[in-house]
Image: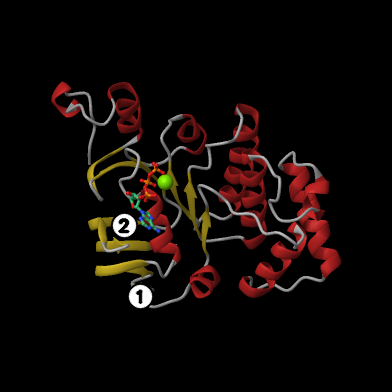
Amino acid sequence: MNLELENLSVKVDNKDILKDFNLKIKPGEIHAIMGPNGVGKSTLSKVIMGYPDYKIVKGDIKVDNKSIKELEITKRAKLGIFLVYQNPVSIEGVRSSEVLKSSYDAVSNEKKSLYEFITNIEDISVELNMNKDMLHREFNVGFSGGERKKNEILWLLMLKPKFIILDELDSGLDVDSLKVVTEALNKYLEENKETSVLIITHYTRILDYLKPKYVHMVKDGTIIKSGDFSLAKLIEKYGYNQSFDIKGDLTCE
Ligand SMILES: Nc1ncnc2c1ncn2[C@@H]1O[C@H](COP(=O)(O)OP(=O)(O)OP(=O)(O)O)[C@@H](O)[C@H]1O
Ligand SMILES: [Mg+2]
């Protein structure tokens, strides 16, 4: 998917969070965003997904050159946008499989019988090294942080999105689980070459696995520096407050 953010400025609770945010992601590209706590990374992901609390005061979000600013969440999901939440919520009283099936029916262009659907999610749960019983428990209720993240990836692999936002997928996953999950994602991306990814993270480990082409550093609600993977390494080494380009070891576009 071709996704473009043009001078995007966003207010939450009457506070300016994103300011003139510009980013172009072409089909098949993987971009990463890094930045200190509270600069607006999760806000960005929710604005792209279409949460009404996040008010766009200026600028636009375009998919294949068409504005999606006025589209509600379900319509954006139908276009193929998928957000893996930093903190996935739980839903009491409904089984995981039921939540997944109803969202699949609402969003996917493919139709599956319940039997086919259950077989499919069970296969994916094996691939993700999940306990199959989790599919039949209440959605995310009592799930550990890592189990919730795996549940999100299972959902993602069922819905086959064209634009994926991973908001701190790596938080909560142990080293082995992160490997299993990123292997499944890489396999999906290999089979779906037009799918683009926006990774939000604080650490380079996930980037070692998913290999973004571009890394962007966000501060005060906007991108202040873009580069390749080496930028992530520099951020890890020096933090966000160092002016490390004067050291001369940064390759920027
Ligand atoms: N619904 C909301 N109501 C009020 N303030 C909000 C809301 N959502 C976000 N904010 C504020 O917007 C700012 C940006 O939050 P956001 O969650 O986007 O940060 P972040 O960059 O994702 O941080 P982290 O790295 O800690 O996840 C914060 O100051 C936060 O308190
Ligand atoms: Mg966040």
User: Left of 215 or right of it: where is 158?
Assistant: right
Ligand 1 within 8 Å of the CB at mark 2: no
- Image-quadrant location for residue 200: top left
Residue of label 2: 24
34 to 118, vertically: above or below: above
- Image-quadrant location for residue 110: bottom right
Residue of label 1: 66
Q: Nearer the viewer, residue 99 or 112?
A: 99
Asked if residue 221 shows in the view, the reply is yes
Q: Nearer the viewer, residue 237 or 94?
A: 94
Task: Work out whether mark 1 precedes mark 2 in sequence or the reverse, and give the earlier one.
Answer: 2
Residue 182 placement (x, y as % from top left): 58, 39
The residue at 62%/49% (across/down) is 153
The residue at 30%/46% (across/down) is 39
Q: Nearer the viewer, residue 201 or 36?
A: 36
User: Left of 71 or right of it: where is 139?
Assistant: right
Query: What number is the disc on residue 208?
Result: none
User: Left of 1 or right of it: where is 230?
Assistant: left
Residue 30 placement (x, y as % from top left): 43, 47
- Amino acid, disc 2: Lys
Label 2 residue SS: strand
Q: On the rendered image, what quadrant is the C terminus found in?
A: top left
Q: What residue occupies the far right of the structure in this picture?
A: 115
- Amino acid, disc 1: Lys
Label tally: 2
The residue at 44%/45% (across/down) is 199
Residue 179 placement (x, y as % from top left): 61, 33
Coloring applied to the structure:
secondary structure
Q: What distance separates the C-alpha of mark 1 from that of mark 2?
A: 13 Å
The residue at 49%/48% (across/down) is 166
Ligand 1 within 8 Å of the CB at mark 1: no
